[in-house]
Image (cartoon, rainbow, N blue to C red):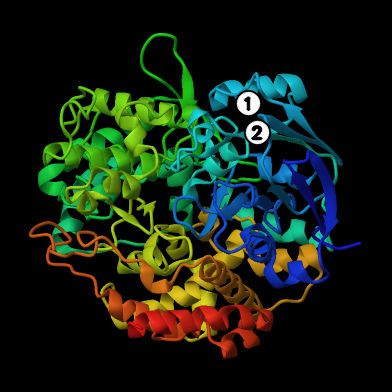
Amino acid sequence: MAQGFFGCILLVDLTHGIVKSEELPPGIIGEVLGGYGLGVRLLYERIPPAADPLGPENILGFFPGLLTGSGVPFSGRFMVVGKSPLTGGWGESNCGGHFGPLLRSTGCDGLLITGSSPRPVVLAIDGGQAELRDAGHLWGLDTIEAEQRIRDEVGHDAQVVCIGPAGEKRSLIAALITDGGRAAARSGLAAVMGAKRLKAIAVRGRQELPLHDPDELTRLSREYTRIFQGEARPLPRLLPRLTRVVLPLLRRLRLKPSGGPIETIVHIYREYGTCFGTAFSTEMGDAPVRNWQGVAASDFPLERSGQISDSAVIQHRVRRYACRHCPLACGGVVRLPGEGAEEARKPEYETLAAFGPLLLNDDLESILQVNSLCNRYGLDTISTGAAVAFALECAERGLLSPEQADGLDLSWGNGQAIVELVRRIGRREGLGELLADGVQRAAARLGGGAEAFAMHVGGQELPMHDPRYEPLLGLAYVVDPTPGRHNPANSGIYDLPALRDVFAVENLSLPGRYDYGRKGALFALLNRYIQVSDSAGLCAFSLLMGRPPLRGWINAATGWELSLPDLLRIGHRIQVLRLAFNLRQGLRPDDRSLPPRVAGQPPLPTGPLKGVTLDMAAMIADYRRAMGYDEATGMPTPELLASLGLSWLIEDLIEETADASISRSGR
């Protein structure tokens, strides 16, 4: 019996209505762990080159992390993977809630969905049994309604992940939703689910994960969770007020705060969750303002950002929410304004920033409504906010006529118009039809120079973290195989206790904020560790909270004896496989770049980011050297592939490398 995993996956052929189990090749989990590491290893060979992302040849995968289901803190994650219809390359989306551990307890390490159903269906997995059920009566329901109906039919102890009307209509910015508001939002994979006519997956599991040394796993977890056992102190509750005093000083001095006492960080996130950072990030220049062209001090000052941050948000909270195996409980449920007292999920920082400073909107009630709409329709709040910002700027510059705007007053900060536009995006109605596939495609359809106002990399809308504030983010947005993501760079926060041992492996000293020549090596090393943490199924917040014993947990669960360098080699292997998937699908490393205004071209004339222009070329060159890629093409070299145990990729990629060289030479 395998230790720490089951050694099999579930295969679902929607075209023929067949469900079966498949044993995994021996040793494969040791090579790539779980989550999207296992996902990319399996899908690289199974999805053909030039596959239509919305066609039956695309494969949609659901993978818990290696430690998901083990009970260790922060191990409640699962990943959705496949070819992204938004970017045309490797697609993945990381999600919390309670679905992942229950999927693992069905006795499999992953789930692959192939083909396309002739009619809407629900996949119901009950222990070791799985069946496809008719979902015609569920098609058209929003995610909250559908989840409740499915639980009524399958069992109230089931966990459900489903799509809403946006996914059904194949919106490329659609999200999968679980547990009433946890979203697998990025890469547009909900559109793939809609194209396959798979409304939902419902799981009920009974199998315990076989663990090598459960006592050691428990000991390590108890030792780690001591930092979460203290009582809340007055200081964190006063921090929002202190923020209003300290932030202007930090902004004027162009200082970048980081870290802090672990107990304080724990209490802040427990009390406020990510909404604590909205005013802070806006004032410091981290949160983009006015579609990435504004400056907080003049366009969205502290008295406005403070209205959609920390205490202003949690005054609407009626109870807390925690994902499975989470010692923090950063989430929450809020009561929406208006009659009926409807409850919805508390908005996270990314949502508050995307519908706040990005749109110059300080109407918190409208943001609460938008967040609920996005959860119900199944929309990625980051991409949807970016689409609205694009529309507002196009209207301002005369590229959208009043008729094209459906009569909406698309002026900056008009909260009710924003709410209505989001509703239309979810339904693909009117202007919403133009925006529902993201800003890249909307700009192409609109024309007239609209691409200049579409903030994306490779088709993926950018998250709410400005690389002019932390250049490492700009590098991540461009070079990571899933572009436009902040998590691979840990949101630019890397001076953390959890990462000190990682940097010590290669004796890497941390570069200065704008030390471009050393950023690539930092990202290459940091990202290897994050590949491991993500593929193990840990929440990114574990990196912020003390020193989680990731290596000890993995070894105790599996019986392996991996060193930290061993884990970093696995992370390197996963990163190369993700890149190889893109190469096989015809994407080249040089195909992607930051929008000029995001790179500081031209630089902002005022504010904390005044005069900043990113040296992307220096960072990319340093990254390629550190990763062992060909510096001219960004392709993995045969020597690198052999060193990572990926020699089987060499023959595939030789042709890709040759094609890239020909392209660069102009022949």
Looking at the image, the residue that sits furthest to the right is 1
Specify the amino acid type for callout 2: Ala
Looking at the image, the residue that sits furthest to the top is 339
Q: For residue 151, what is the image quadrant?
A: top right
Q: For residue 309, which numbered disc appears in the image?
A: none
Q: Residue at x 52, y 57 (%)?
A: 545
Looking at the image, the residue that sits furthest to the left is 605
Q: SS at mark 1? A: helix
* Quadrant the C terminus occupies: bottom left
Whether residue 411 sits left or right of residue 7 in the image: it is left
Q: Which residue is mark 1?
A: 147
Residue 634 appears in view: no
Q: For residue 348, what is the image quadrant?
A: top left
Q: SS at mark 2? A: strand
Foreground residue, 517 or 17? 17
Q: Which residue is mark 2?
A: 200
Q: CA distance from mark 1 to mark 2?
A: 8 Å
CB under 8 Å between discs 1 and 2? yes
Whether residue 173 sits left or right of residue 219 in the image: it is left
